[in-house]
Image (tube, rainbow, N blue to C red):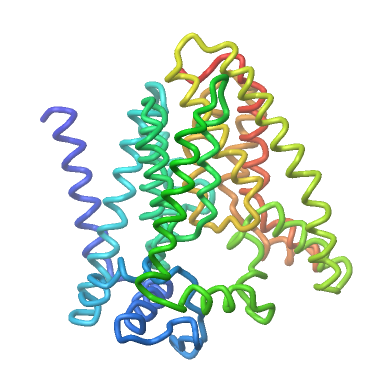
């Protein structure tokens, strides 16, 4: 059998395994289809909590995002077990598409088995996170990596259009539109077109579902909501880490939130300045524009992980290609081992508690964030030689 045949057989086996595996609680899937069901019935999904397995949850996606899940909702309503298994298989398919994009567009030839093992297990195993929870992050991630592939190939217009579409779930990814500006000749026209497309698409929420955007905004800005206070490996962001540490030290959540944001500003300025300076070196040394574009994407993803106010466990899909490039560059073995170990540990908070760390066991819940900092640092330091 040819190499392509072997790969297709393995992909088919992965899809079959995902479909045959009995899904767990898939809480996020249940939340998504429940919100879509309320919206399809003419209700306001943001007006009240959903109760799933005795626990209350809010609806947080924009209305049109829930509209996208109406076919899945109908399938789950008609055949719950089949629908959940089909969704798991679909997520594995999206992961396989990401693997293809990573390998064909952003990675040089390497040891594929080791890369696959890293992609499956590093940073808390985001694939298994989405399979267990049923979260729709894989849809957003495939849109993002498709956009990055378009950017790397020099298609700015298609790139900004894909980013505008990917940002309809959570808006935060819209920041990647700046990639068309981070080079010697900024493409302001593409940037403006991407921003306009994003606003136009988001504005369709109000046109199709009048009044629901205001209801969603009221829900998301409600200080009584619990989701903004997710911490540890579930929301492994720099801002979350600082808030968590200050809350633990002061036992005053309000003061901790205020000061964490103040402390985050100089950190964000430092990361942004160092990243922009590195990108200038990339483009100054580049003999191949596409190589510089690939390096730009990888650096931007690494910086994004350190700047995003909220960076969930499944968002760590973004760090897999930058981490692989960092690991396969000419860095000392000790640093390479540190990145791998930290990325694989994810969280050892329970062990830290058993060792007597007490409330400061929280430090053992952010290993993948520490790995992300190292990956970003490696990519910043190696920018004189763009990704091949």
| Quadrant of res 353 | bottom right
Question: Which residue is found at the position 71% from the left and 56% from the top?
Answer: 239
Q: Is residue 36 found left or right of 357 in the rendered image?
A: left
Name the residue furthest top.
Answer: 287
Up-down relation of residue 132 to residue 177 (above or below) = below
Residue 338 appears anywhere in the view: yes
Q: Is residue 152 found left or right of 366 in the rendered image?
A: left
| Quadrant of res 152 | top left
Question: Which residue is found at the position 45% from the left and 16% from the top?
Answer: 289
Name the residue furthest left.
Answer: 1
| Location of residue 370 in the rendering, given as x and y in whole percent from the top left corner | 68, 45
Q: Is residue 180 found left or right of 108 in the rendered image?
A: right
Up-down relation of residue 85 to residue 320 (above or below) = below
| Location of residue 296 in the rendering, given as x and y in whole percent from the top left corner | 53, 28
Up-down relation of residue 142 to residue 261 (above or below) = above
* Residue nearest the observer in this picture, 312 or 4: 312
| Location of residue 136 in the rendering, given as x and y in whole percent from the top left corner | 39, 62
| Location of residue 226 in the rendering, given as x and y in whole percent from the top left corner | 63, 77
């Amino acid at each position: 059998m040819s190499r392509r045949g072997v790969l297709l057989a393995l992909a088919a086996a992965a899809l079959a395994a995902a479909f045959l595996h009995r899904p767990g609680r898939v809480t996020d899937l249940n939340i998504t289809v429940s919100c879509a069901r309320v919206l399809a019935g003419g209700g306001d999904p943001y007006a009240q909590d959903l109760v799933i397995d005795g626990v209350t949850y809010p609806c947080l996606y924009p209305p049109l995002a829930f509209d996208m899940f109406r076919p899945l909702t109908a399938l789950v309503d008609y055949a719950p077990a089949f629908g959940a298994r089909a969704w798991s298989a679909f997520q594995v398919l999206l992961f396989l598409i990401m693997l293809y994009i990573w390998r064909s567009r952003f990675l040089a030839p390497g040891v594929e088995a080791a890369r696959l093992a890293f992609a499956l297990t590093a940073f808390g195993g985001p694939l298994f996170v989405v399979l267990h929870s049923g979260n729709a992050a894989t849809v957003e991630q495939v849109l993002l990596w498709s956009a990055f592939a378009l950017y790397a190939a020099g298609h700015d217009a298609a790139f900004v259009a894909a980013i505008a579409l990917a940002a309809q779930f959570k808006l935060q990814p819209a920041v990647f539109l700046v990639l068309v500006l981070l080079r010697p000749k900024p493409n302001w026209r593409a940037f403006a077109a991407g921003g306009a497309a994003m606003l136009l698409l988001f504005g369709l929420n109000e046109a199709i579902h009048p009044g629901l955007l205001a209801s969603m905004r009221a829900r998301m800005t409600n200080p009584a909501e619990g989701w903004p206070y997710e911490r540890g490996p579930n929301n492994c962001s720099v801002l979350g880490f600082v808030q968590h540490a200050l809350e633990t030290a002061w036992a005053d959540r309000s003061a901790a939130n205020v000061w964490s944001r103040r402390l985050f500003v100089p950190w964000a300025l430092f990361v942004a300045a160092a990243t922009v300076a590195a990108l200038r070196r990339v483009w100054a040394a580049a003999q191949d524009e596409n190589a510089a574009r690939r390096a730009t994407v990888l650096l931007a993803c690494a910086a994004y992980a350190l700047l995003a106010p909220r960076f969930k466990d499944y968002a760590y899909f973004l760090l897999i290609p930058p981490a692989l490039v960092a690991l396969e560059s000419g860095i000392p073995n000790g640093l390479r081992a540190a990145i791998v170990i930290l990325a694989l540990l994810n969280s050892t908070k329970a062990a830290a508690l058993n060792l007597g760390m007490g409330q400061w066991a929280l430090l053992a819940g952010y290993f993948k964030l520490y790995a992300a900092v190292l990956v970003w640092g490696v990519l910043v330091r190696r920018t004189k030689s763009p990704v091949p």
